[in-house]
Image (cartoon, helix red, strand yellow):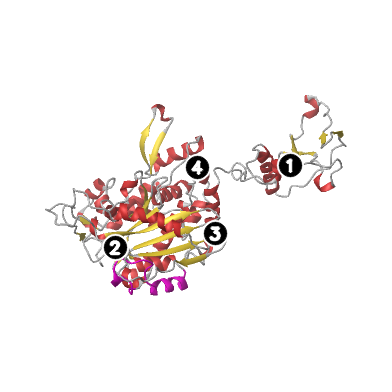
Amino acid sequence: MDIPSWSPIVCTPPATPLESDLRSTLSRFGSHWDNLPQGRKDESVIIDYAKQKLLDGPNVLRSENRSGSLACLSVRFALEFNMDDTARDVTYAQVERHMRLCIAATAGLEKMTTIPGSEPLLAEATYELMKDTRTNAVRHLADHSDLNCIDRGRRGELVAALLIMQAYDAARSMPVAGGRRWVSVVDFMKALLPATEYETLRQSGPTFWRTNEDIEITFEGISKEYGVWFNHLIKIEDRRMVSIDHLWKFVTRGAMIMCATNQEGIDIVLPVCQTTRNLGPDSVTAIIVQVKNAINYGATHDTTLYDAMDSAVTSAIFSTLPESVATSETKMAEKVTPKPVIRLVFALASPEPAVVFRERAPVVKHHVDEFTTFDIWLAGLSEQTFRQIGEDLEPYNALLERSVLPHDAFELKDDKRMGEKARILRGARRRRMAPLNFPGADHGDVHQEKDLEPPPSQAAPQLQEFSADEMHEDSLSLPPPTPQTKEHTTSKRKITASPPQPSTSTSARKGKKARVRMAF
């Protein structure tokens, strides 16, 4: 389906004709397009205008433009912001100057509900802006000064979306794409997997098959007539949107799907179109992705996760067409013929990298499955698993680690001036305030029996003093010990108390640095 950028994709009734270009979704740029002189009605002109609107003036993304960078990331990955005061100020700036949408607000703007919106043209402008920086989106996000304002997710789905989008952008840049926005499924999987693993997939048969004819067909043979097209992400609110009645509509918007929170079995859906047919409910299938960021999902695949995907595929994607579509007038079958599905599991926290192809089902005479599938298990963040990671492994790991933790208070990553030693000490003191939250010894010491004369390595900490300025230096050195403390002994443990400090008059304190008491 090598369609020109402006030619229509005709859909079978009752769907209305659609266009493959970006003009069909000019919700906020239509008036500008209509007022352009006839000689300037070119796609590059409207995309350049979208860049200026997104960046609040310039049409080039500079490294120092932090709010512009955040705007680009928000458009492509549907970022959600936290509700604290700092995040609120960042959100207000995005709405005011960077095209973010406000859908609800209280009196006095004390609370606002905002979304990035879904505009393929704006997302295409974002794609070009970030491509010109020669820095991948994951590094833009991981290094961003406002990262703490962004919702971290809980499943690692944002990291998975970054991996998928990076692979898609790489496939789109391949010479075989010829400048097209859509890419074949074969080229997308080639960009996603390492070369050796892709070659194995290319020559392999399906894990399960719907007809006896599918048994001998390879992945390359089945997938050559299917393509994908997306330049941004839509986070759906209702799981019913993952159905054959809606899946093809995401293709027209150039969007992949982030599933609703707590949706069973699947986390990300990549709509796939059969390029030899008109776009419509009966010409789409999907690449289904389930994301795991728990370390117990390792390099060995868990077949139960694929089983959990089955219900989503059969009941949602290949279910009966609704009455609005399947009527006698449309001459469409009431039930869509199931097409091949790729099921991927991203076990991102696996300590061991691996690409595992699920063993093919045994060939049993007269036995076929509901649909044809290719099941692949992708374990670990590594070049051995994901082809495009390259030099971006560190930011990917940072974002994955962030998705596991509910906040960064114990790691103190919000203060960039703090030295590493001070960070460790303060983190330990904070963890002591959270009993039994961590397996370490920060608070666990209170549950340990101690000898009357503990060895020097286990002696009670002594209170030391150093200035507030020293708290922010990496080269933090221990000051001289304080005077000997008094000891009080109980039957089980020794309690050490510091001697009372002499009072100091206000005049005596003048000209001296403030001192901070900390335990080592």
Can see residue 239? yes
**Is 368 above or below relative to 462?**
below
Q: Position of residue 347 (x, y in %)?
A: 50, 58
- Looking at the rendered structure, the secondary structure element under dot 2 is loop
| Residue linked to disc 4 | 149
Q: Residues within 10 Å of mark 2 (few under 14, many from 20)?
A: some
- Work out whether residue 217 or residue 134 is closer to the camera in this orientation and state it: 217
CA gap, disc 2 and disc 1: 59 Å
Is residue 470 within the magenta segment? no
Q: Position of residue 241 (x, y in %)?
A: 31, 48
Which of the two labelled residues, at mark 1 and mark 3, occupies the earlier sequence position?
A: 3
Q: Residues within 10 Å of mark 3 (few under 14, many from 20)?
A: many
Amino acid type, residue under disc 1 in the picture: Asp
Q: Which stretch is magenta? A: 194-217
Is residue 204 within the magenta segment? yes
Which of the two labelled residues, at mark 3 and mark 2, occupies the earlier sequence position?
A: 2
- Looking at the rendered structure, the secondary structure element under dot 1 is helix
Q: Which mark is residue 60?
A: none
